[in-house]
Amino acid sequence: MRIGYARVSTDEPSLDLQLDALKKAGCKRSFTDKASATKADRPGLADALSQLRSGDVLVIWKLDRLGRTVKGLVELVADLQGRGVQFRSLTDGIDTTTPAGRFYFHIMASLAQMKRELLAERTRAGLAAARRAKPVGLSPRQVAWLRCEVDAAGAAGERVVLFQHNYPYQIWEDFSGPGIDDWREIVQTRRITAVFTGHTHYGQVANDGRNVFVTCRSIGDPEGGPPGYTVAHLQGEDLAVAYRTIEDTGPLLLITHPREKILAAGPRHVICRDDEICARAWSLAPLRAAEARIDGGVWFVLSGSSPGFCSHPLESARLTKGEHALEVRVTDALGKTASQRIEFVADPTGRYTAVPVIHPVVTKTAFC
């Protein structure tokens, strides 16, 4: 029996082309996934593998529909052959029912791996050349511009948010390029609302006890996980951030008040009197319900003054001094849900000292 498997990434439009080819190849049943090849959880593939019996053939449209690494592909095909199951890739001309097909499979897989290794090698060489060409840091002119802009904003009572391209919290620790000490002096002696930095393959939030640092993660490969983007809310003393992958299709939820503990930089960011819970939600379908609970208690309904905005009174008398957990969840008209959980601080005395904290702690990466 021939069993087919088809997969498209989340940004690809349709499975029709693959399914038509599998049907023409004689597949009696076909299983599908809409997920990245690097994603470990692919229920369609798991179902297809569970249905295969000795003498069956697993048929795919193209080799990269099954996996992206040589190790994974070779191990999968070896496992199939150990179970008496053969493998066929239509567009690659691979058919392990024949000796030539088995040999061709290994050659194709090796070439694919070599291509990925060459690409990674060229990327590393390019990064090394860029580092040699220009040291990480700021020129005297850039430092003067930054100091002038920050001081002018402070004098006008404006908030300051820095956007810069560098490794996230590490710039505070051991970067020693030109102008870095001047950068530290500006950030340490002026009130900065947040510093947003860029990185390709991991996200991170840090608080040095005075300022907040947010790293915006853009891609999932090679560290793992799908690519995505950071959503930020800044209004008054409220600052909230959330990471969302491109595979997320339901509502987007962001708790905007109270401020999350890791983002709290002083007493103005803790609950010291009667306040309110505030959240924002974005959804393609109308929102049907919004609920919240504190410290794992009973869920209560949030009300909305306008579409996408919901809130509820927060009575300080019900909060003990210290840390509390707040959970919010929303449901849209299609039944899709989104939820967020944060920790916040309550102190009726109005005193709070932020301590340095970072999440997640990243000590090494597999790529750079």
Image: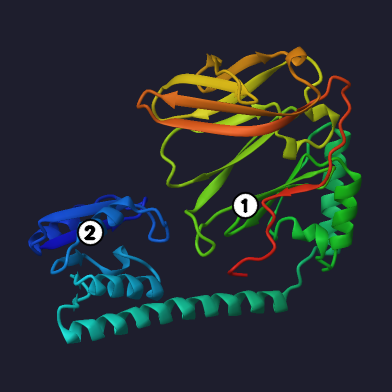
Q: Which mark is residue 203?
A: 1
Residue plotted at (49% across, 55% down): 225
Residue 220 in the figure: left or right of residue 111: right
**Location of mark 2 (residue):** 5
**Image spot of residue 60 (x, y percent):** 22, 65
Q: Which mark is residue 222?
A: none
Residue plotted at (76% across, 68% down): 136
Q: Secondary structure at mark 2?
A: strand
Determine crowd level at label 2: few under 14, some 14-19, many 20+ residues with C-alpha closer than 10 A: many
Residue 277 in the figure: left or right of residue 270: left
Residue plotted at (65% across, 79% down): 129
**Image spot of residue 72 (x, y percent):** 38, 70
Which quadrant of the figure contains the C terminus? bottom right
Report the mark closest to the observer, 2 or 1.
2
Using the rendered image of the protein, determine whether residue 238 is visible from the camera's viewpoint.
no
Which quadrant of the figure contains the N terminus? bottom left
The answer to which image quadrant residue 123 occupies is bottom right
Q: Secondary structure at mark 1?
A: loop
Determine crowd level at label 1: few under 14, some 14-19, many 20+ residues with C-alpha closer than 10 A: many
Q: Earlier in the sequence, mark 2 or mark 1?
A: 2
Q: Is residue 9 above or below residue 251?
A: below
Residue 137 in the figure: left or right of residue 60: right
Using the rendered image of the protein, determine whether residue 25 is visible from the camera's viewpoint.
yes
